[in-house]
Amino acid sequence: MCTGGAIHSALQSNDLQLSHVDFVNNTAGQYSGSIFLGESHVSVLMSEVSVSGSSADSGGGLYLSRFSTDVVLSSCDIRHNSASVGGGLVSFVEGLTIQNTTVDSNVALASSGGAFVEGAVGWLTLQGSFVSGNVAGSSAGGLMLFKSGNVTIESCAFLDNEALTDSGGALSVGNSYPQHLLCAQYCSRGGRRSSN
């Protein structure tokens, strides 16, 4: 299967909800080992969803395409996934909220061990979450933000993430505009928080 080893949601829908679901050891050749989200979803809520042991070329655990406008990950667990880019997840959605979620021990051969987030006119809100133990072969061990317009990171911990050959062990910011970094802890190995 090319995209979405477990779920490939590519039909236009007003909303999508996943609650108390475990995705384990799923694989896709191209996008998202477990959950691929495409086309127009007005509202997406994933609550207490666990994604682990999944792999793909891009977005080991989740791949959220640019056609959706409001995606919320609440109390989710994204662990031990792998990809070339975005070991835990890749997101291009217009608005992404991640709250009380753990992104842990994911691996990217290139960049963005934990997550890669790009949203040219959208927003990212990261609250009360842990980004820990993720590894990238080049840059952004924990989280890479690229072309994201409004970014709020509040009461989060970035712990023991590692960028092996480049900067951004915890967080790499490229052409993004973080507006609020509140009570965020940056404690990572093999790199530094970068802005370029």
Image (tube, rainbow, N blue to C red):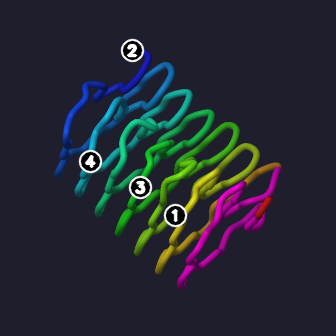
Mark 3 → mark 2, Cα distance in angstroms: 26 Å
Dot 1 or dot 2, earlier in sequence = 2
Q: Give the number of the disc on residue 96.
A: 3
Helix, strand or loop for disc 3: strand
Three-letter amino acid code at the position of disc 3: Leu
The answer to whether 118 appears left or right of 54 in the picture is: right
Disc 1 designates what residue? 131
Q: Is residue 134 above or below residue 153?
A: above
The answer to whether 9 appears left or right of 84 in the picture is: left
Mark 1 → mark 2, Cα distance in angstroms: 29 Å
Q: Is residue 55 above or below residue 143?
A: above
Q: Is residue 181 above or below residue 71?
A: below
Of circles 1 and 3, the one toward us is 3
Q: Give the number of the disc on residue 1.
A: 2
Dot 3 or dot 2, earlier in sequence = 2
Dot 4 or dot 2, earlier in sequence = 2
Write the residue at 19% across / 43% down.
15
Front one among 117 and 66: 66
Dot 3 or dot 4, earlier in sequence = 4
The answer to whether 114 appears left or right of 174 in the picture is: left
Three-letter amino acid code at the position of disc 2: Met
Give the magenta range.
166-194
Tell me where residue 41 sits by quadrant.
top left
Graded by Cα atoms within 10 Å as few (under 14), some (14 to 19) or many (20 or more), the crowding at tag 2 reads few
Disc 4 designates what residue? 44
Three-letter amino acid code at the position of disc 4: Val
